[in-house]
Image (tube, rainbow, N blue to C red):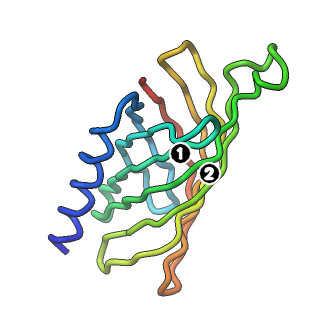
Amino acid sequence: MRKAIWLLVLLALGSGALAQRAVSFRLSLHPAGPGLGLGLEAPLERNLAFRAFLDLFPGGPSFLGAGEVLFKPDLGQVDRDLRGIRPYFGGGLGAFFGATGEVGLQLSLGVEFLVDARTGLFLDGEYFYAFGGGRFGRTVIGANLR
């Protein structure tokens, strides 16, 4: 368990070493209770981004850490009036640590609205499907600061 925690911490710090990142502040609305989180997002290509995050659910206590690749186009490429609206979807691997530790698939679908060049607000629907059979979905709202 401690090795997994250190692995997630190293993943978060290693992701922060890359240039031009966004820091995400997240509020997860989970059926078992709300959670707070912190994440890092990095552009990979023109419409691709990598996101790593860690959400803490104090009611458990438990936490969820994941890394995802997101397809995240700016609709301003299609119509200038839609500039700053960025729908996205993607997925990756995640780990949920509570009473038992589970590893599984993390899926995301959401939209980010850019307030200015350095700030974005997002609404995200996320789903965690553990390889052992457990699963849960949640809604996440938050802000990205670049």
Q: Which is more toward the observer, 98 or 60?
A: 98
Residue 15: percent from left, percent from top: 33, 45
Other-residue count near label 2 (Cα within 10 Å), few / some / many at <14 / 14–19 / ≥20: some
Depicted 6 relative to depicted 133: above or below: above
Residue at point 56%, 56% (across, down): 138
Q: Quadrant of residue 27?
A: top left
- Which residue has dot 2 on it? 125
Q: Are marks 2 and 1 in contact (CB under 8 Å)?
A: yes
Q: Secondary structure at mark 1?
A: strand
Disc ID at residue 107: none
Query: Could you tell me which quadrant the C terminus lies in?
Result: top left
Residue at point 44%, 39% (across, down): 41
Q: CA distance from mark 2 to mark 1?
A: 6 Å
The residue sitting at the left extreme is 2
Query: Could you tell me which quadrant the N terminus lies in?
Result: bottom left
Q: Amino acid at mark 2?
A: Gly
Of the residues under marks 2 and 1, which one precedes in the sequence? 2
Residue at point 31%, 80% (across, down): 100
- Which residue has dot 1 on it? 140
Q: Which is more toward the observer, 110 or 79?
A: 79
Q: Quadrant of residue 120?
A: top right
Residue 110: percent from left, percent from top: 65, 44
Residue 32: percent from left, percent from top: 46, 62
The residue sitting at the bottom extreme is 132
Q: Amino acid at mark 1?
A: Val
In this rendering, position of residue 64 left or right of residue 109: left
Q: How many marks?
A: 2
Q: Secondary structure at mark 2?
A: strand
Residue at point 59%, 48% (across, down): 70
